Image (cartoon, rainbow, N blue to C red):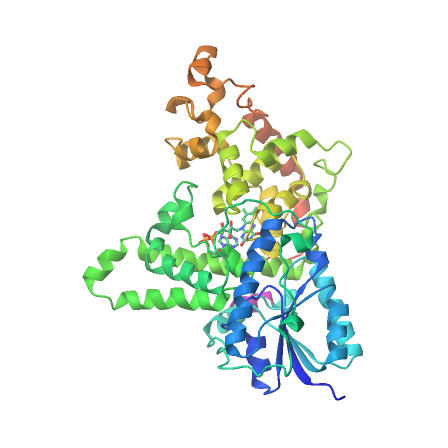
């Protein structure tokens, strides 16, 4: 029997139908399109994986299957490693071409993509990987000056039109499509985290809601964990799983800013006086995302190795001498620093935290607790629903002081608490054991006398821990150690991985 000719669109972290180059190209071929998602054991068993990631991805896949069905061919789902799955499809169909996006993610995925390239070549199947976001593959370091203009060019281009229809595979049964497995089928525990909605429609709603209503005070409210959840865009998981394209976000924000110029004064007033500044800052952050990701594209080992090797062995990592109790206290929000603990518990619950508080958590782990980022990175990857390796690892290294880029950056968790949550509202919400602590002690409850502790119903050391470290002492020590390593000698080691103008 002759095999049916198809084009495969291999979905990975690009779970959408809008502005999707591979889908557009495959549909344009006029042949039946097989849109494919592979549930890879490598993803499910990675130390960075959390069942809540699957909750989010699964919701995206259910919606994507429906959207593709409306175009003509529902999503096909297979479980297994990428090469054997593609190989078995190539036995069933005559695969004319495989389309996918370039992925800048973790080392496992880079390796998987390499293996698929080798396999596709061995089968003489063209495998076309199209650029995603503003990351430029193959850009040599001596041409890094060109990065900004290449990205800008991409952001200006028209989004790929969504095909009006895609030609379906003939004779495919519902069973042939494959199940979108739930947690039980994958053998993973479902957890009760309160995540934001997933899928392409939710992404669009989130972006529009931010640009038209919520974002007007972003510039003022994004730093405090009290106000940031509503005032920030919350599009990070959508960019991470590709339910929204970077180009769509960039073009939407630019259109809004352009429209603003021609708005009647009354409408302008309604937007608020911080609206323009807020949207501009948001646009800058989108660029920063691509800039950060480009660092990992150039140096994928950032996921596992200090960029500045002088830091190797400085902080404990692994079994020997690894202060497990400190890590456990930090992960569970029991360090004795209310802002650190409330931020961690909020993050553990919701999968999201604003940038400033993420940075404070990392600064605390790296400098106050003196932990190696490789030891605490997996916890953050698991709890972030927007886990994006190429943003995550460069940020961890930058904040730990181990990256080429920038010097040591540290936060004072007490000053931060007073600035971002002066009344202690956020702290009380996420640390119920501090609910009865008076405002004057909410940022440092250990300063209460024994009598005050009894009266507030919070005994330090019993209901809430005493601070694990002396912050001033710990930072002074960290500054000396980090300073010694980030000396001019280290700068000489600068491998030039930095983008210009950062
Ligand atoms: C240690 C650490 C780890 C991080 N890990 C991740 C991660 O795994 N995935 C992730 O998406 N973001 C990560 N960030 C960046 C940032 O904190 C989040 O993108 C942001 O909080 C997400 O919320 P939002 O979508 O409301 O962002 P907004 O504040 O509304 O910003 C809009 C978008 O800009 C981008 N962005 C904002 N700030 C940054 C930044 N500093 N660097 C790069 N891009 C930025 C994000 O894509 C974000 O969605 C990390 C930050 C730190 C300090």
Please, what is the dominant secondary structure of the magenta stretch?
Answer: helix
Magenta region includes residue 146: yes
- Residue drawn at 67 percent across, 46 percent down: 490
Magenta region includes residue 8: no
Residue 90: x and y in percent read 74, 78
Q: Is residue 298 above or below residue 6?
A: above
Residue 252 visible from this viewpoint: yes
In the orientation shown, which residue stands out farthest toward the top?
451
Residue 124: x and y in percent read 77, 82
Q: Is residue 385 above or below residue 82?
A: above
Residue 460: x and y in percent read 52, 19
Using residue 333 as the reference point, say whether residue 488 is left or right of it.
right
Give the image quarter of residue 479: top right
- Residue drawn at 42 percent across, 14 percent down: 455
Return the residue nearer the eye: 36 or 147: 36
Q: What are the residue bounds of the magenta stretch?
A: 144-148
Give the image quarter of residue 440: top left
- Marks counted in the figure total 0
- Residue drawn at 64 percent across, 82 percent down: 171
Q: Is residue 83 above or below residue 417?
A: below
Residue 500 visible from this viewpoint: no
Using residue 327 as the reference point, say whether residue 242 is left or right of it.
left
Residue 178: x and y in percent read 65, 68
What quarter of the picture does the N terminus occupy?
bottom right
């Amino acid at each position: 029997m002759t095999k049916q000719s198809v084009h495969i669109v291999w979905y990975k972290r690009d779970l959408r139908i809008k502005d999707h180059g591979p889908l557009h190209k495959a549909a344009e071929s006029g042949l039946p399109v097989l849109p494919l998602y592979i549930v890879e054991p490598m993803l499910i068993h990675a130390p960075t994986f959390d069942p809540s990631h699957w909750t989010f991805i699964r919701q995206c896949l259910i919606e994507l299957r429906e959207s593709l069905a409306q175009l003509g061919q529902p999503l096909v789902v297979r479980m297994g490693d990428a090469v054997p799955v593609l190989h078995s499809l190539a036995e069933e169909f005559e695969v004319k071409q495989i389309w996918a996006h370039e992925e800048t993610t973790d080392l496992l995925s880079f390796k998987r993509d390499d293996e698929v390239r080798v396999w596709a070549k061995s089968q003489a199947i063209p495998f076309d990987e199209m650029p995603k976001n503003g990351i430029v593959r193959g850009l040599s370091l001596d041409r890094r000056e060109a990065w900004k203009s290449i990205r800008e060019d991409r952001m200006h281009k028209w989004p790929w039109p969504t095909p009006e229809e895609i030609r379906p595979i003939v004779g495919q049964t519902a069973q042939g499509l494959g199940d979108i497995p739930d947690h039980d089928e994958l053998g993973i525990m479902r957890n009760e985290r309160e995540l934001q909605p997933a899928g392409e429609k939710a992404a669009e709603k989130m972006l529009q809601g931010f640009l038209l209503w919520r974002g007007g005070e972003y510039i003022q409210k994004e730093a405090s964990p009290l106000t940031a959840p509503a005032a920030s865009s919350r599009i990070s998981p959508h960019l991470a799983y590709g339910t929204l394209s970077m180009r769509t976000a960039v073009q939407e924000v630019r259109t809004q800013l352009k429209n603003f110029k021609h708005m009647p004064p009354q409408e302008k007033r309604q937007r608020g006086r911080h609206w323009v500044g807020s949207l501009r800052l948001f646009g800058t952050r989108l660029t920063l995302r691509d800039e950060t990701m480009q660092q990992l594209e150039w140096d994928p080992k950032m996921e596992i190795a200090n960029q500045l090797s002088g830091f190797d062995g400085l902080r404990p990592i692994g079994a020997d001498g690894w202060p497990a109790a400190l890590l456990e206290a930090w992960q569970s929000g029991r360090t004795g620093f209310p802002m650190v603990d409330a931020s961690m518990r909020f993050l553990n619950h919701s999968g999201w935290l604003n940038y400033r508080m993420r940075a404070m958590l990392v600064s605390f782990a790296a400098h106050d607790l003196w932990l190696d980022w490789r030891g605490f990175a997996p916890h953050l990857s698991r709890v972030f629903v927007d886990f994006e390796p190429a943003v995550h690892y460069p940020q961890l290294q930058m904040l730990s002081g181990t990256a080429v880029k920038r010097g040591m950056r540290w936060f004072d968790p007490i000053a931060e608490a007073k600035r971002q949550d002066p009344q202690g509202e956020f702290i009380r919400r996420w640390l119920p054991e501090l609910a009865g602590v008076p405002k004057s002690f909410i940022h440092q409850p250990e300063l209460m006398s024994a009598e005050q502790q009894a009266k507030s119903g919070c005994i330090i050391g019993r209901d809430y821990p005493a601070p694990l470290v002396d912050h001033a002492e710990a930072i002074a020590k960290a500054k000396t150690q980090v300073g010694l390593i980030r000396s001019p000698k280290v700068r000489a080691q600068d491998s030039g991985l930095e983008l210009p103008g950062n």
